[in-house]
Image (cartoon, rainbow, N blue to C red):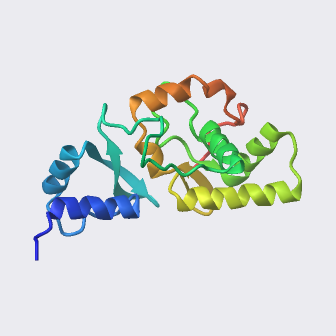
Amino acid sequence: MTDVDPGALALARMRARGADLRIDGTDPETVHRSARAAGRVVLDTTVAGLPAHILGWQEGHEPSLEEGPGVERRRASRIDLEVFAACLGCCWPDRVSHPWPGVPRAREDVLIAVGWARERDSQQDVSRYRSALERLDRAQWVEYDGTHIHLGPRVRTWNRAEVDLLRGVFDRLPGLPLLEEPAL
């Protein structure tokens, strides 16, 4: 039987789990070395307020935005994208900074921002928005702690070029411009 590189195995676990609270029994430097060799980087983040790690890409090693043979990307639904845009617009108040971690916002504020952007807010729509928030939470794009929405650990993985692209549409993100900073 062939020995498995512990760093590569730890990277595979991190890739499968998303943001992870620990690096399972492997020397962290071994994991970082394996990540660098694969064009990846281990980033510090938080999950439910606890320190965690997530895989990102080294600058210049990001996958191409153009799909090639063997590259399959999951397409998010329109409502998931609209709700995430509202989360980003509400939780990222300062375009100069990186969006993560941003500021926490009440779930109802995000739901209002989505309704405002779509100019309707029927009960059925609000139910769809809540379902989209649950999907975004499970996918680690946002975190919902029962009271507030936070930008999730996946946002932490965005590189400078991706954040610069978002800065170009910052003013068009749905949000609540008159909303004051939340009192925590």
Residue at 42%, 49% (x, y): give it.
70
Q: Relative to residue 79, is residue 100 drawn left or right?
A: left
The quarter holding residue 176 reads top right
**Total label count?**
0
Query: Looking at the rendering, in which quadrant would you find the N terminus?
Result: bottom left
Residue at 19%, 69% (x, y): give it.
25
The outermost residue toward the front is: 69
Residue at 67%, 32% (x, y): give it.
173
Q: Is residue 51 above or below residue 110?
A: below
**Viewer-closest of 167 and 162:** 162
**Viewer-closest of 78 and 41:** 78
Q: Position of residue 94 (x, y in %)?
A: 54, 29
Residue at 35%, 57% (x, y): give it.
51
Q: Position of residue 167 (x, y in %)?
A: 54, 25
Q: Is residue 55 above or below residue 131?
A: above
**From this viewpoint, is residue 154 visible?**
yes
Q: Position of residue 5 (x, y in %)?
A: 14, 63
Q: Is residue 11 above or below residue 42?
A: below
Q: Position of residue 8 (x, y in %)?
A: 20, 59
Q: Is residue 134 above or below residue 157?
A: below
**From this viewpoint, is residue 95 visible?**
no
The quarter holding residue 60 reads top left
Q: Relative to residue 24, is residue 55 drawn left or right?
A: right
